[in-house]
């Protein structure tokens, strides 16, 4: 695939695949104003989907997005479902509401995330970045699996190149209850989990004709970076760790220029819409294409996919049959 590039915009993607948006039911997590999730859903609305379902912790942060959609498309069905991905009980409540609301979900975009936060555990006792960025999405997608078992459905998991900060600590995901915690290692763990989860989903969804992808949206100045930008030491540590990580792979770390929000949502939309990607289900995308850089083994191998699935089922106390 060479159609898309670093500078491609979400509007270009939706314009190219309007027929794959129109009339569809699309769910996205965490489309708060000022983030790539909001830009993703606003761009999708121009393609006239039948129903947009927006989930998040706070209606206040998402209402401006809903208002913008309604002002441009007054008849478009838009539903907000409260869902705090850091806590399993609200995720279960949200899934029940969504299951009662729709017959099918054509596209589910796992967008919500937190980044480089101080150490904290969720109410369920799981490190907060792993709980929010991976485990909440794992539970939500699995509880909605009955609505995703249709030909052509897609699950898109928004990851990050920061998966290079480290793999999943299968024996110590809570960093010794915070004693050995590093913000970037924890973020890397959660982003590696995103990639392994998408690969597992691709195998499971293949039975019913569905697809799954993970992706790096690029570096975008957005509300996701609030903790990092307020602490220069955290930012410097993150950059130093990326330099060291790339050096281990025999590569020189080069910071890509920042993308605009319009560019930042493009790869998510390509993963959700481009029919040429069907043969690459499970792959990690970067700049609108299957990543040209070799993905690290810990973020792709089958053993780790299966270990993460089992760990995630253990942490949510439920097994899922696709």
Image (cartoon, grey):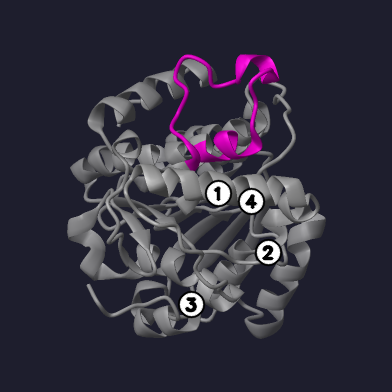
Q: Percent x, y for residue 122?
A: 70, 26
- Label 3 sits on residue: 10
Q: Is residue 127 visible?
A: yes
- Label 1 sits on residue: 101
Name which of mark 3 and mark 1 comes first in the sequence.
3
SS of the residue at dot 1? helix
Quarter of the picture holding the N terminus: bottom left
Magenta-span inclusion, residue 169: yes
Q: Percent x, y for residue 311?
A: 43, 19
Depth-wise, is mark 2 or mark 1 nearer the camera?
2
User: What is the spatial separation of the Cα atoms under label 2 and label 1, in whole angstroms?
Assistant: 31 Å
Name which of mark 4 and mark 1 comes first in the sequence.
4
Picture residue at 32% right of the left edge, 42% below the top: 296
Quarter of the picture holding the C terminus: top left
Give the extent of the magenta segment: 165-188
Depth-wise, is mark 4 or mark 1 nearer the camera?
4
SS of the residue at dot 2? loop
User: What is the spatial separation of the Cα atoms under label 3 and label 1, in whole angstroms?
Assistant: 28 Å
Q: Which mark is residue 55?
A: 4
């Amino acid at each position: 695939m060479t159609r898309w590039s670093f500078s491609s915009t979400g509007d270009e993607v939706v314009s190219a695949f309007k027929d794959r948006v129109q009339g569809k039911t699309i769910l996205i997590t965490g489309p708060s104003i000022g983030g790539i999730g909001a830009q993703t859903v606003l761009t999708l609305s121009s393609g006239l989907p039948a129903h947009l379902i927006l989930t998040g912790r706070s209606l206040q942060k998402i209402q401006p997005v809903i208002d913008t959609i309604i002002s441009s498309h007054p008849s478009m069905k838009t539903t907000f479902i409260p869902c705090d991905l850091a806590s399993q009980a609200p995720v279960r409540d949200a899934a029940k509401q969504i299951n009662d609301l729709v017959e099918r979900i054509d596209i589910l975009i796992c967008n919500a995330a937190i980044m480089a936060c101080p150490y904290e555990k969720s109410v369920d006792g799981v490190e907060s970045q792993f709980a929010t960025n991976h485990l909440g999405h794992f539970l939500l997608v699995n509880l909605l699996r009955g609505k995703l078992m249709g030909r052509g459905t897609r699950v898109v998991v928004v990851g990050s190149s920061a998966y290079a900060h480290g793999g999943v600590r299968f024996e110590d995901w809570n960093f010794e209850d915070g004693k050995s915690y590093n913000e970037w290692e924890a973020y890397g763990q959660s982003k590696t989990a995103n990639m392994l989860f998408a690969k597992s989903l691709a195998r499971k969804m293949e039975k019913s004709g569905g697809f799954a992808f993970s992706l790096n949206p690029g570096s975008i100045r957005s509300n996701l970076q609030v903790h990092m930008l307020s602490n220069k030491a955290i930012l410097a540590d993150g950059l130093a760790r990326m330099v060291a990580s790339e050096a281990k792979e025999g590569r020189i770390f080069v910071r890509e220029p920042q993308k605009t929000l319009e560019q930042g949502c493009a790869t998510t939309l390509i993963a959700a819409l481009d029919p040429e990607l069907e043969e690459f289900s499970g792959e990690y995308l970067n700049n609108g294409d299957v990543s040209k850089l070799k993905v690290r083994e810990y973020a792709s191998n089958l053993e780790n996919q299966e270990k993460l699935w089992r760990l995630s089922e253990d942490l949510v106390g439920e097994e899922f049959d696709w």
